[in-house]
Amino acid sequence: PWTQMIEAHFLAKVGEMLGNARYCILSGSMPPGTGVDTIRRLATICHNANCLLVVDTSGPTLMSLVQEESVGIDILRANRDEAQYSTHTALQEPKDFADAAARMIDRGAAKNVVLGVGGKGNLVVTSDGKSLFVPAPKIEVISRVGAGDSFVGSMVLALAQGKSWEE
């Protein structure tokens, strides 16, 4: 479990490491003792460094995030199961995903929400009301392990290269 001292050290190190970074990605499960306040502090550090915060987490942390206001996340990413779990909603159709993402944005959990729609693709909803479904390429699936992490990495790389959400 994280103590206040460990968290302070972590946040200070992140602040030192950001340098000229344009994106900071927080991905994976959060250690016990961390939560929305930790992410809110991280978002403040990122924004003070003119860096965008991308969060791809799950479980209780994600559930807390989607219920919060003004967390400061620039891009929140969740897969279908995580989105259903955290919103307590059965998400079936693209409209269900878009509505769930819009509610997260309206609450202030994030400025932009990207929800995985299983093997069908991803839905992007932005704070300016844009909604975009990006179909997944047709490939032979050998393993789903790391698929979400790979998606987040390629998405952030494309955005960092100046590509639009559509691209």
Image: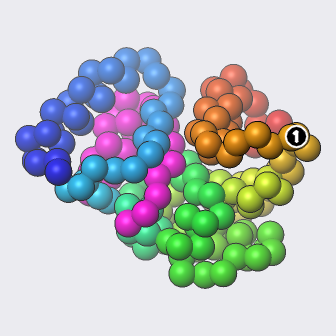
Looking at the picture, does residue 125 appear above or below residue 39?
below
28 left or right, relative to 4: right
* Residue 146 coordinates in the image, percent (x, y): 60, 39
Q: How is the image coloured?
A: rainbow
- Dot 1 falls on a residue whose secondary structure is loop
Closer-to-camera residue (126/158): 158
Amino acid type at mark 1: Ile
The residue under label 1 is: 139
106 left or right, relative to 90: left
Q: Residue extending furthest right? A: 138
Q: Residues within 10 Å of mark 1 (few under 14, many from 20)?
A: few
Magenta range is 37-60
Residue 44 appears in the picture as rendered: no
Mark count: 1
Looking at the picture, does residue 67 appear above or below residue 135?
below
Q: Residue at x 22, y 34 (%)?
A: 10
* Residue 61 coordinates in the image, percent (x, y): 38, 61
Please identify the quarter of the rendering in which residue 127 is found.
bottom right
* Residue 60 coordinates in the image, percent (x, y): 38, 66
Residue 62 appears in the picture as rendered: yes
* Residue 128 coordinates in the image, percent (x, y): 68, 58
> The C terminus is located in which quarter?
top right
